[in-house]
Image: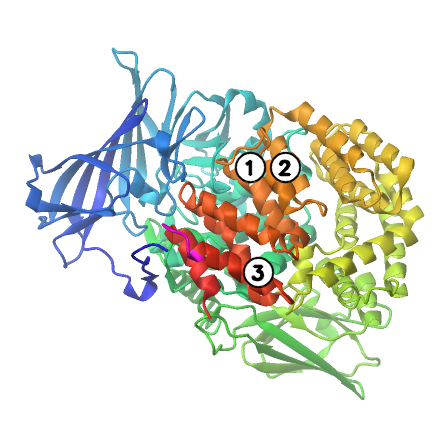
Amino acid sequence: MRDAEPKAIRLKDYEAPALQIRQVHLAFEIQPGETTVTSTLQIERVRPGETDLRLDGQELELLDVTLDGESLSANAYQLDEDSLTLFDLPDRCEIRIVNRIHPERNTALEGLYKSGNLYCTQCEAEGFRKITYYQDRPDVLAKFSTTITAGSAYPVLLSNGNLVDQQTLNDGRRQVSWEDPYPKPSYLFALVAGDLARLEDSFTTMSGREVKLVIYSEPHNIDQCDYAMDVLKRAMRWDEQRFGREYDLDIFMIVAVEDFNMGAMENKGLNIFNTSCVLASKDTATDPSYMRVEGVVAHEYFHNWSGNRVTCRDWFQLSLKEGFTVFRDAEFSSDMNSRTVKRIEDVNFLRSVQFAEDAGPLSHPIRPDSYIEISNFYTPTVYEKGAEVIGMLHTILGEEVFRRGSDLYFERHDGEAATTDDFLAAMADASGRDLSVFQRWYVQAGTPVLAVESRWQEGTFTLILTQSCPPTPGQTEKLPVHMPVAMGLLDADGKLLDPATLQLSSDSEYDIRGDSIVLHLATASTSLRVEGLATEPVVSLLRGYSAPVRLKYPRSPEILKFLAIHDSDGFAAWDALQTLLVDEIGSYSGRRRVSETLIELFAALLEQAQAAVISGSDEDRFMLAARLSLPQESYLFEQFEQVDVDALCAGRDALQQALAAELREQWLALYQAARSVDAYQPDAAGMSRRALCNLALGFVAVALEGGELVELLEAHYSQADNLTDRRAALVAALHSTSLDSAVSRRLLQRFLDAFRNEALVVNQWFSVQAGSPTCSAQDIQTLAAHDAFDGRNPNKIRALYSAFAQANLRNFHAADGSGYQLIADTVLALNSSNPQMASALAKPLTRWRRFSGMRPGLMRQALERLAAADDLSPDVYEVVIKGLAD
Ligand SMILES: [Zn+2]
């Protein structure tokens, strides 16, 4: 344990600084081994208050500091580990600071660091203080100009804004100057220096301005940037059309970087991307990777308004930019592809990962009220639940009013640092709606439970809805929230009743939206009555997953099957089938065969799938692939309050085997029908076909044995002209219980030999193995010793250790505790070199209360071992202490 315990920072202590930096010029001199930063700050008093100015700074070597041109005497300032404080400043002054940093030694990848031969920055949330002394907080907005000087080995020198000057100095070095006309906080600063190839294009904005678009990458990757460029142009057009947002600089740049802790970063005019979120080619990206590139390129671009032009007042408001921008990128992806499939993917993630966080000791509201290390709060709660909350607002207000609200928000707060309350106030003012009950979504943690009961009596159907929310750390009492519950009623033939013709009544407000009823549940309980019906209807509930809640609505297998077949809402139909599957797995007793209901349902869906391959739409194929997929272990575990790892894994295996064996011919027929003879295209037609084909391959590989299986897998691998299919062959081989392991080893070796020089493909090579049911903690250690592994590269760490702890739950939770030990060892190894990665890896250990048997004790032991370590970083300390708290 460290000597001084890191302190928590609280929202209620927020205070705006009286003296603020209004303008800054940064001059970087990049030399081998060290970089000198000269920062010239224009300071102004913006409100009455203190006369001392505290500047954040970490791991900096201060060389000089002057005030209005005069050197400062030693008693005019104070320097400590985290800050430089200047005393008794006038209301207006210029401060010049010179300091030295060592990007080459920066393994935490925060601030300015070196990735291969490339210098780059990551400043969100608090990385800028590792570059120079500054008010490193989002509510200090200043105009930045930057000059970079570097040797000829670094011909590309980039920063934010517009390029204003470039020259070659007499000594051969290059010097480039950039100016950003838009005031911004330090977390949006960026710098890149390297020898990079470029892909150029242009975009004409809605007001007719020409914007230059450039994607930079290392030369050998530049042919993998075309897809991202295409997405960028589509995203720019979409944001104009859907949100009225136009781009504002002369140039927009993206740089692909190999060593990056996050997915990507929205620095003003100069986005920096993890290669995994920007590069795409048929041999290096799977279909889901293409989708991810589309989502992330759009997300970072959208931040130019929701994040940059309007930023966050403090880091407690992180969801202001992230929740809103995740909502925006999800809408973009839904408009570009299938809305229903995108919704299913998002709900799958929410229920697997965010619900787990909400139910554990790290549970926090989307606007947290305290933190020790803000890096720990880039969470699924702030992002994904944050986006769900914006989505509910969209459902409550409707598209037109929501757009009025977002226009008002941007207009009111352009150039400012705002709060989530400001956002809600704009929405309330634009709509005339009282959002005070809705606001509780921002301050209450935990996943609300929606319990539903229905009654049928003499032509009257009554639905009773009750909400509650379990206690979370620090919050025992919860108030009701405002949740929109979208529903429809189906008659006995499965036909949706037109809500406009129904005799509805309720104590609560409700709207008719298209073919659904949206009931506003804003109290603990309410009911909805429908009179004058001839027969009892079946309810299609939470259509489109209109609120991020756990639904408790006991329904018979027959009703769920009925909904799975007839519900016209694609999400609700999928959800009914998932519920059936989870029930089936949860009730597995070790002997019983799979229920007839499920076999019949799968047989019917398989028939539809085969027809869809021949004559259906892309949407049909995507939907059927989603419906025929069994829930992943992470999803499954979250459906139970007490998790019995062995029973649930055995139940899932038994179900998969039974469905594979009973319907073997149908899976084979689907597999054959869906195999494509066309060359790879990353379009909906190809992706939906591959989704069905590779899903069928998974079941076929379970059903077949011996030479027949070997032949099929080798043919699938050899004939593949793309990574999606090759990867599917490897996954199927590694998941088969009957296949000789020499066959999978042979396929893995072929894969590695062919793509050893493609880092993103090598990551896949690690992750398919780390996620396979036969991969133990011991095997992970063997893989970590492989010469293709690099323990400092975040993508490799994720491909091996995160894939193991998050996607290979049966081995992470191995009964002997070896999985927990491996992860704890890795956290300790990364604790000082990369605290952000270390704390992310420690998080799964904190969920020990949810498991049955010996596992909670073993998980606690691993956490206690971490707690006892010397020099724990604040990042890991916070996760471990909260994980052990009573
Ligand atoms: Zn973001």
Q: Are marks 1 and 2 in contact (CB under 8 Å)?
A: yes
119 w.r.t. 18: above or below: above
Q: Secondary structure at mark 1?
A: helix
Give the residue at x 75% y 41%: 734
Q: Nearer the viewer, residue 465 or 696?
A: 696
Q: Position of residue 148 (x, y in %)?
A: 30, 26
User: Where is residue 666 drawn, in percent x and y?
Assistant: 91, 48
Crowding around mark 1 (Cα neighbors within 10 Å: few <14, some 14 to 19, many 20+) is many
The disc, 1 or 3, on the residue closer to the chain's N-terminal end is: 1
Dot 1 or dot 2: first in sequence order is 2
- Main secondary structure along the magenta-highlighted residues: loop
Residue type, label 1: Lys
Q: Are marks 1 and 3 in contact (CB under 8 Å)?
A: no
Label 1 vs label 3: CA separation? 27 Å
Quarter of the image for the N terminus: give it. bottom left
Which residue is the site of mark 3?
858
The colour scheme used to paint the residues is rainbow
Residue located beneath label 1 in the image:
796
Q: Is residue 116 magenta?
A: no
Type of the residue with mark 2: Phe
Magenta-span inclusion, residue 869: yes
Q: CA distance from mark 3 to mark 2?
A: 26 Å
Where are the magenta residues, as a range?
A: 867-871
**Position of 534 compared to 221: left or right?**
right
> In terms of depth relative to the viewer, which is nearer, 230 or 677?
677
The structure residue drawn at horizontal position 77% and vertical position 35%, both measured from the top left corner, is 744
Residue 552: quadrant of the picture: bottom right
